Amino acid sequence: MRLEDLYLVLLVGGAVLLVSIAAARAAHRIGLPSLLLFLAVGVLLGEDVIGLQFDDARMAQALGTAALGVILVEGGLSTRWSDVRRLLLPAGILATAGVGISVTVTAAGAHWLLGMDWNLALLLGAIVSSTDAAAVFAVLRSLPLPQKVTGLLEAESGFNDAPTIILVLVFSTAATESPAPLDIAGNLVYQLAAGGALGLVIGRLGAVALRHIALPATGLYPLATVGFGIVAFAAAGAAGASGIIAAYLASMVLGNSKLPHRAATRSFAEGAGWLAQIGLFVMLGLLVTPGELPSAVVPALVIGLFLLLVARPVSVALCLLPFRVPRREQAFISWAGLRGAVPIVLATFPVVSGVAGADGLLNIVFVLVVAFTLLQGPTLPAAARRLGLTRPGAMRDVQVETAPLDVLDADLLTVTVPAESGLSGVAVFELRLPPPTAVTLVVREGAAMVPARDTVLREGDELLLVTTPAVREAAERRIRAIGRRGRLAHWLGEHGDPEPADRPAPG
């Protein structure tokens, strides 16, 4: 490559990055998922519009898998262990048995409704049955939902990529090979177990190393932390195990360890995750040919509706039956099964394997992802409200990059005092938050003020709290308890559990 060519590549790449960032800002303002505009940028750059040619499915598969690894690293670093530890069993069942049920039901729908042969129908079912971690992380963390619902969806999306990848590979080679069911099950168990073990071991080793080795510059800590996640991803892949599971678990271990410069690490990982998403979606937009998409609209809508209204609810209901999850939560979990980059990347696998009809599957998956992201993403807040799951007073993380807070290992939380909340009328000193937690700012009717001990809270107030990881859970419990029963919550037997045991289960 000549120097002039390098400058041209960097110019185009930088311009695409800036346009994509501007698109992300525009998508946020109008309430659309960013991935749609990233895909649109790729389509506009493609051969049917601007003329940039890219049709290498093998390269798209390799780069897409690597990008998914980076996205899972960022997701693992920002996942709180306290939110998901009690949900590993139901999430694991959703990510394994749930995927199997969804694949079977979706394949049956494709076979009977569209007349697909069983091999293509099973391939399509496997490709679209995985929920997308990037989409789930991006959408759910902005909603004030119960921790159980958010944690379950996040853990499921982090774990279910591995089983779907295995099934897609099996069905892609089924035309030339016929693996026995026991071989498939053994491969699945090995990939999950070995990938999980490698992820936990590398994550633990990374945490010990970063706590005991003094690096010469602050900026090296984020690089090293993300580097351990990438090492876990690559090591598991080289061992024939699931790199996706390894990257997610290693990053979760690192993210929940008391590492130095946590705020800088999370900011760096978030930037790397955004870069991976932008590159991935733009590349996938380049890969499709817009002129071939109209013929895929009807089958994509048929399969998407069947997946959304039949296959996903059936798999969720059957998998969560032993756990007595209320029906309204099951309904939201079914609706929140977002699809994103993962199905489009998986659709490149049969193309690379030379499966007959694979190009048509890629177009169907692309249209399905776009159409149902437009349907599901913007409607999730309304669905949560309609099902009575939104928690207006729930704590939300505030992303900060302030050195003193980083030195103190502190967290910032915001709390909104909702209508008819027990927080209304309570003075700040009556909150009795566990030290060193403090209410540092109150925003009331658009004006900010520093509260005194005797400042009385009102409906609509937004509070800014500073706390530490050691007492964060206790502070959240105290806020929830007072919100439910007022200043005498403790004496009334209310302890602020995330999901109160005395709350009747609807449905």
Image (tube, rainbow, N blue to C red):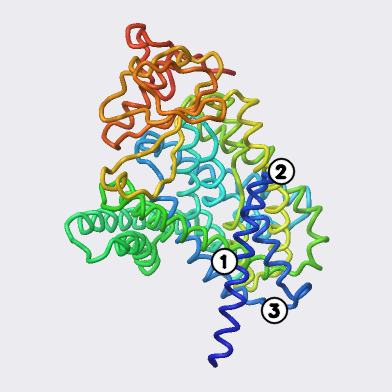
Q: Secondary structure at mark 3?
A: loop
The circle on residue 53 is 3
Q: Amino acid at mark 1?
A: Gly
Figure check: 9 above or below 217: below
Answer few, some or many: residues within 10 Å of disc 3's Cα (few below 14, many 20 plus, some between 14 and 19). Answer: few
The Cα atoms of the two marked residues, 1 and 3, are separated by 16 Å
Label 2 or label 1, whichever comes before in sequence order: 1
Answer few, some or many: residues within 10 Å of disc 2's Cα (few below 14, many 20 plus, some between 14 and 19). Answer: some
Q: Amino acid at mark 3?
A: Gln
Identify the image quadrant of the C terminus.
top right
Q: Secondary structure at mark 1?
A: helix
Count of labels in the image: 3
**Is 475 or 226 nearer to us in this picture?**
475
Q: Nearer the viewer, mark 1 or mark 3?
A: 1
**Is 202 or 349 nearer to us in this picture?**
202
Figure check: 38 above or below 413: below
The answer to whether 295 appears left or right of 44 in the picture is right
Q: Amino acid at mark 2?
A: Leu
Q: Residue under label 1, please give it.
A: 279
The circle on residue 358 is none
Q: Residue under label 2, please give it.
A: 375
User: Dots 3 and 2: beta carbons under 8 Å?
Assistant: no
The Cα atoms of the two marked residues, 3 and 2, are separated by 30 Å
**Is 339 or 434 nearer to us in this picture?**
434
Residue at the image point whose x is 50% and y is 59% from the top: 166
Identify the image quadrant of the N terminus.
bottom right
Label 1 or label 3, whichever comes before in sequence order: 3
Is residue 322 shown to the viewer in this render? no
Percent x, y of residue 332: 59, 33
Label 3 or label 2, whichever comes before in sequence order: 3
